[in-house]
Image (cartoon, rainbow, N blue to C red):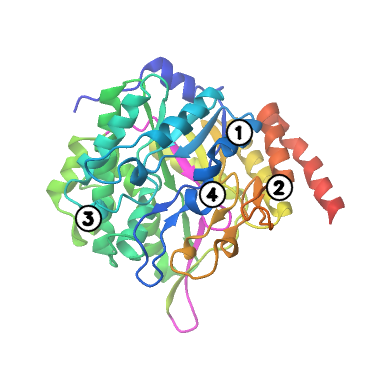
């Protein structure tokens, strides 16, 4: 296949060894299907009040002095039915980011789709629908926006839609996971083609969740290896790495994939100009074990910043492209968040000193998110807030979704302004937190 590649100058600007992109973003999960028992949907922008506060929220991003920001656009509002398009929200919000001198890293799909797409990612027209939507958006911002994420966390999307059955189309099996993964990956490939046909200067930004699977049980060693290979499956598919020599080839065929479906990816491989790693100390480390009753379990122990070192080496050795930490944060107290910021940034600096082209760092989310359990629960939004941000959401009688800056915000702002060399200044914020307690 003949690929249309991003211009050399544009790609170099984003991924040059001396480039470093500080970023942040607002959680933008959009699950538009109502839960069968509660009737609730999960639109993070609605639940955190961002649709009403977007102008002020984007102003908070500008306070940090970050050069770019991951920002999701709600496809379900842009295209409420197949024949209707409303570009008001992206025109206003992306336009405002550009006015502020912040380059949008546009998140095109973040887990959910418009409700009218029956079968969600398994709708036979999904690749065409998503690529058409992407092309129309890229055309509106041609020459002004460079970064586009075709789909955030394809593996997690396939897991929740195809294996756990939480989200449409509600499959609950490994064959369901494989079917979703193939459909999602094909949509990503077609999206990249569409974007590059509109503007060859566009640099697709591939973002996925990064997990590290380990076990001390020799009987689970093969399963841990397979789970680790599945972590890379989406990127391997879209970049044409899955052939009959791939470690998951037989497993994919066993779980419903056909050879013609897999051949599509070999024939239509796209370049990975930059890979984003989503990683969290409370989620990313996975330990496979059996409990006292012999049942298979996965535990998630809180990890240290060494997971960044391990992941940086794993991803670079596999793909040999520039990397970016596209999401990271710690949940809980300000002290814990500050500690993770300091340790994770130091790990980033150390990786770069060893020649790993880690070209950016994103604290995500910039303010509290609403936990996914909200959709199937009945408690109010304010009881589902996960405080992981640079700002907390602290309800009060006058404003139930008030944004309150924390010392983490101050520390991050100083880092952005001083560069990686400013990692040592974080101890000042930690000292202030100690005095406050």
**Any part of residue 4 in sight:** no
Task: Please tell me which of labels 3 and 1 falls first in the chain.
Answer: 1
What residue is drawn where x is 53% and y is 40%?
Answer: 25
The residue stretch that appears in magenta: 270-294
User: Between disc 4 and disc 3, whose residue precedes?
Assistant: 4
Residue 41, percent from left and from top:
41, 59
Residue at 39%, 40% (x, y): give it. Answer: 318
- Mark 4 Cα-neighbour bin, 10 Å: few <14, some 14–19, many ≥20: some
Crowding at mark 3 (Cα within 10 Å: few <14, some 14-19, many 20+): some
Query: 81 left or right of 429?
Result: left
Quarter of the image with the N terminus is: top left
Residue extending farthest right? 435
Q: Which residue lies furthest to the top in this view?
A: 9
Q: On the rendered image, what quadrant is the C terminus found in?
A: bottom right
Q: Determine which of the numbered discs, if any, sits on residue 118 in the image.
A: 3
> Badge 2: how crowded within 10 Å, few (<14), some, or many (20+)?
many
Q: Of the residues tagged 4 and 2, which is closer to the observer? A: 4
Contact between marks 4 and 2 (CB within 8 A): the answer is no
- Pointer 4 residue: 49
Mark on residue 59?
A: 1
Residue 338 is tagged as 2
Mark 1: secondary structure: helix
Image x and y of residue 403, in percent: 65, 47
Mark 2 or 3: in front is: 3
């Amino acid at each position: 296949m003949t690929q249309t590649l991003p211009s050399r100058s544009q790609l170099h600007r984003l991924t040059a060894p001396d480039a470093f992109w500080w970023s942040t973003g607002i959680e933008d999960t959009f699950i538009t299907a109502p839960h069968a028992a509660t009737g609730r949907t999960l639109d993070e922008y609605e639940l955190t009040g961002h649709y009403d506060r977007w102008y002020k929220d984007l102003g908070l991003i500008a306070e940090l002095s970050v050069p770019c920001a991951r920002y999701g656009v709600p496809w379900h509002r842009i295209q409420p039915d197949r024949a209707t398009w409303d570009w008001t929200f992206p025109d206003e919000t992306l336009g405002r980011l550009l006015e502020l001198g912040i380059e949008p890293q546009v998140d095109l799909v973040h887990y959910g789709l418009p409700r009218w797409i029956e079968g969600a990612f398994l709708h036979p027209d999904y690749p065409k629908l998503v690529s058409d939507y992407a092309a129309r958006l890229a055309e509106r911002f041609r020459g002004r926006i460079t970064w586009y994420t075709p789909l955030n966390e394809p593996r997690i999307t396939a897991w929740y839609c195809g294996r756990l059955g939480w989200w449409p189309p509600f499959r609950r099996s490994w064959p369901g996971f494989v079917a979703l993964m193939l459909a999602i990956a094909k949509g990503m490939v077609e999206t990249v083609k569409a974007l590059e046909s509109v503007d060859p200067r566009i640099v697709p930004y591939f973002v996925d969740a990064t997990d590290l699977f380990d076990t001390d049980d020799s009987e689970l060693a093969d399963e841990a290896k397979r789970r680790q290979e599945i972590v890379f499956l989406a990127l391997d598919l879209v970049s044409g790495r899955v052939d009959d020599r791939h470690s998951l080839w037989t497993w994919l065929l066993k779980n419903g994939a056909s050879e013609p479906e897999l051949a599509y990816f070999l024939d239509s491989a796209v370049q990975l100009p930059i890979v984003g790693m989503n990683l969290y100390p409370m989620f990313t480390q996975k330990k496979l074990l059996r409990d006292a009753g012999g049942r298979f379990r996965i535990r998630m122990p809180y990890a240290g910043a060494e997971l960044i070192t391990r992941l940086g080496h794993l991803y670079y050795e596999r793909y040999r492209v520039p990397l970016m930490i596209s999401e990271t944060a710690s949940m809980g107290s300000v002290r814990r968040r500050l500690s993770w910021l300091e340790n994770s940034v130091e790990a980033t600096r150390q990786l770069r000193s060893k020649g790993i082209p880690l070209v950016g760092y994103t604290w995500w989310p910039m303010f509290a998110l609403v936990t996914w359990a909200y959709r199937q629960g009945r408690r109010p939004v304010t009881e589902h807030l996960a405080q992981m941000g640079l700002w907390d959401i602290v309800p009060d009688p006058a404003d139930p979704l008030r944004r309150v800056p924390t010392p983490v915000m101050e520390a991050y702002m100083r880092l952005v302004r001083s560069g990686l060399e400013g990692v040592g200044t974080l101890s000042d914020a930690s000292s202030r937190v100690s005095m406050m307690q």
